[in-house]
């Protein structure tokens, strides 16, 4: 703790420091004169000691909560729509939830500065999702309620991050524990003689038994010995096994973005619910999901954060789904730099910017290869959008219904943006879009984090005060009764429903209801796995077996139009995968390839070797690779 002593000594030349300690990666300084520590002064200290720092007021100078709340409401203009004010004495913070955080902050931060100088509490502003989200409510309430535990957790993590067990970093290696030469159960262990870090912890939802989970039995150490977990994005093949770690002894932090934390909670809870309904054994419960929430440290994109004594983490946009990140690890004071791409899109979409390419250094890149074979070329994004728009227009003109089966998180929200644009363009009159299944909950989470969306959508929301997710064409479907009415009515419409591969859920009910009529259309925009009902329909089967409303299997006639739009993926196609490596700054010396069928990973490895003269490796799960 020598660094803390030094920081204290330095600061005490100017202010009195009543307490100084680590909370997770940050140095926390308590003082009776917080106003004396200007932002500039803090920045200089952060730079000098290479530690993130937060200055907090000493408890003795805080205005009492009642008077503080009154002042906040007086100072902040009512247009901010403050929806909640909660005081957290464990951190001397006040969480202000508002519909318009920008107004709480004020021009150049003036409003907030005035609040702070009067009440002394540190204001923490959070955005109230415009579409109410019970997931966000639960997460925020849990964190508030558990503040005391959370404080001791952060202190414990802080000590581990800043106290070395070894003298120096002597070696670095990676060991794939799942998701290599396959898609699903992504997990990579990054180790040095000082640190054990796990990147992603997913499940393979299509597999049974132990094939569904990563090889945690190969860790070679107790889960208590794991120092940190980093989750790239919310999809279950990257986050679905995380609660299991906490169930079986892991007590450390999970680092990810705030939207990923919220979306993965939604998906994990849904995963448990479905397993329970189907009578399947689950390796964890909802209580374990709550433990994930309590132990997650969220990071904004671009912040460099110490996560162990010899490793720094930086997350940046990967362009795949809301909050999805490319992970950069700097290990051992300049020894080795790893970029783990997770799932990424090196191309813009209507919802997100393309993946980040600039890194301070990068010797090894671990990348996905979902569309890694030479045949995996996707058409231009705009052409895909136009194809979908054209099909919707023609079906609506024929008084038909359009069903688009989608995954809850990702393409669904991109389609909402495209459909809202279509409605605004006036090309289709009186279009209603019914939204069924988990899509609505996921969209609600999108409305809490507009700053993670594409520049265009951000501009719509912040500059033009228009939120496309709130478009009046979108109608939430609440229950089976409403679903039946939509199916039975003669009204032409668009329906977005889960599941994406017609393996269950409302999309199957809609299909059964509308598949007999020629004027209706089903549009596939996402990958259909072999053996699923989606794949059969896509292949052009004229009959299909589906369970009827009483749960009895029935053969039905498939007469509706079947239309597939390739290229609507959140993954990079072959060209984008190669372009990403070649456009990365710097270009990595070595690329380790995973997250793809074996043949695709090998195909991409050969291409990168040929085109970029890059050293490539396609390890099997458990093949450890020494990096330094
Ligand atoms: Zn994904
Ligand atoms: Zn994935």
Image (spheres, helix red, strand yellow):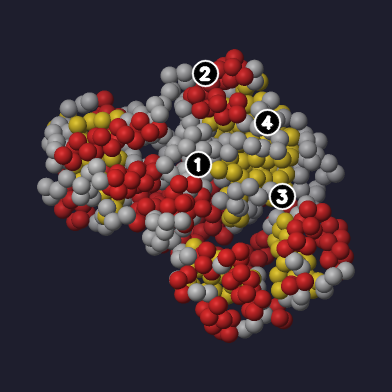
**Cβ of disc 3 within 8 Å of ligand 1?**
no
The alpha-carbon separation of the residues under discs 3 and 4 comes to: 22 Å
Residue carrying label 3: 306
Label 1: element kind: loop
The alpha-carbon separation of the residues under discs 2 and 3 comes to: 36 Å
Q: Left or right: 2 with respect to 114? A: right
Measured along the vertical axis of the image, is residue 494 above or below residue 177?
below
Closest to the observer, 628 or 196: 628
Q: Left or right: 277 with respect to 574? A: left
Q: Left or right: 622 with respect to 128? A: right
* Residue appearing at x 43%, y 23% in the figure: 377
Q: Is residue 89 in view from this perspective? A: no
Label 2: element kind: helix
Q: Are marks 2 and 4 in contact (CB under 8 Å)?
A: no
- Counting from the top left corner in percent of width and height, residue 551 is at 20, 45
The mark that comes first in sequence, 3 or 4, is 3
Closest to the observer, 117 or 310: 117
Q: Is residue 4 in view from this perspective? A: yes
The mark that comes first in sequence, 1 or 2, is 1
* Residue appearing at x 71%, y 81% in the figure: 61
Closest to the observer, 393 or 268: 393
Residue carrying label 4: 586
Measured along the vertical axis of the image, is residue 53 above or below residue 95?
above
Name the image quarter holding residue 379.
top left
The alpha-carbon separation of the residues under discs 1 and 2 comes to: 27 Å
- Counting from the top left corner in percent of width and height, residue 500 is at 33, 39
Residue carrying label 1: 353
Residue carrying label 2: 603
The alpha-carbon separation of the residues under discs 3 and 1 comes to: 27 Å
């Amino acid at each position: 703790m020598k660094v803390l002593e030094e920081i204290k000594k330095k600061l005490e030349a100017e202010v009195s420091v009543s307490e100084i300690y680590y909370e997770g990666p940050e140095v926390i300084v308590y003082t009776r004169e917080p106003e004396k520590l200007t932002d500039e002064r803090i920045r200089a200290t952060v730079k000098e000691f290479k530690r993130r720092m937060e200055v907090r007021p000493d408890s003795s100078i805080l205005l009492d909560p009642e008077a503080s709340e009154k002042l906040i409401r007086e100072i902040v203009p009512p247009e901010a729509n403050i929806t909640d004010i909660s005081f957290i004495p464990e951190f001397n913070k006040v969480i202000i939830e508002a519909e318009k955080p920008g107004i709480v902050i004020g021009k150049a931060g003036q409003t907030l500065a005035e609040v702070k100088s009067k009440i002394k509490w540190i204001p923490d502003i959070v955005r109230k999702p415009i579409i109410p989200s019970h997931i966000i409510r639960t997460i925020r309430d849990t964190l508030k309620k558990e503040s005391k535990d959370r404080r001791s957790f952060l202190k414990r993590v802080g000590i581990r991050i800043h106290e070395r067990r070894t003298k120096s970093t002597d070696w670095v290696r990676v060991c794939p524990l799942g998701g290599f030469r396959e898609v699903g159960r992504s997990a990579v262990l990054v180790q040095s003689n000082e640190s054990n870090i796990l990147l992603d912890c997913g499940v393979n939802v299509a597999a049974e038994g132990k094939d569904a989970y990563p090889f945690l039995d190969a860790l070679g150490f107790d889960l208590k010995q794991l120092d940190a977990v980093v989750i790239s994005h919310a999809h279950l093949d990257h986050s679905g096994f995380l609660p299991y770690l906490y169930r079986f002894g892991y007590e450390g932090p999970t680092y990810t973005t705030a939207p990923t934390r919220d979306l993965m909670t939604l998906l994990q809870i849904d995963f448990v619910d479905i397993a329970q309904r189907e009578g399947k054994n689950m390796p964890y419960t909802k209580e374990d999901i709550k433990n994930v929430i309590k132990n997650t440290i969220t990071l904004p994109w671009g912040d460099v954060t110490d996560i162990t004594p010899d490793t720094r983490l930086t997350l940046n946009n990967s362009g795949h789904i809301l909050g999805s990140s490319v992970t950069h690890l700097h290990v051992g004071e300049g020894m080795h730099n790893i970029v783990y791409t997770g799932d990424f899109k090196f191309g813009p979409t209507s919802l997100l910017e393309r993946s980040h390419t600039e890194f301070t250094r990068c010797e090894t890149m671990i990348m996905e290869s979902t569309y890694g074979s030479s045949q995996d070329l996707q058409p231009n994004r705009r052409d895909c959008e136009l194809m979908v728009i054209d099909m919707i227009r023609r079906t609506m003109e024929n008084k038909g219904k359009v069903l688009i089966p989608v995954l809850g998180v990702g393409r669904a929200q991109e389609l909402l943006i495209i459909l809202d644009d279509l409605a605004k363009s006036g090309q289709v009159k009186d279009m209603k879009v019914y939204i069924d299944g988990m899509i609505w909950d996921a969209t609600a989470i999108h409305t809490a984090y507009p700053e993670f969306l594409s520049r265009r959508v951000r501009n719509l929301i912040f500059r033009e005060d228009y939120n496309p997710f709130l478009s009046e064409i979108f109608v939430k479907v609440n229950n089976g009764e409403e679903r039946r009415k939509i199916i039975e009515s003669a009204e032409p419409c668009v329906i977005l429903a889960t599941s994406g591969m017609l393996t269950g859920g409302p999309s199957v009910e809609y299909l059964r209801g509308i598949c007999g009529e020629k004027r209706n259309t089903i549009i596939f925009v996402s990958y259909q796995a072999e053996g699923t009902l989606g794949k059969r329909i896509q292949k052009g089967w004229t009959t299909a077996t589906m369970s009827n409303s009483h749960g009895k299997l029935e053969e039905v006639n498939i007469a509706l139009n079947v239309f597939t739009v390739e290229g609507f993926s959140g993954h990079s196609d072959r060209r984008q995968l190669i372009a990403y490596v070649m456009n990365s700054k710097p270009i990595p010396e070595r690329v380790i390839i995973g997250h793809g069928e074996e043949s695709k990973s090998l195909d991409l490895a050969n291409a990168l070797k040929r085109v970029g003269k890059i050293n490539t490796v396609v390890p099997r799960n458990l093949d450890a690779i020494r990096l330094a």
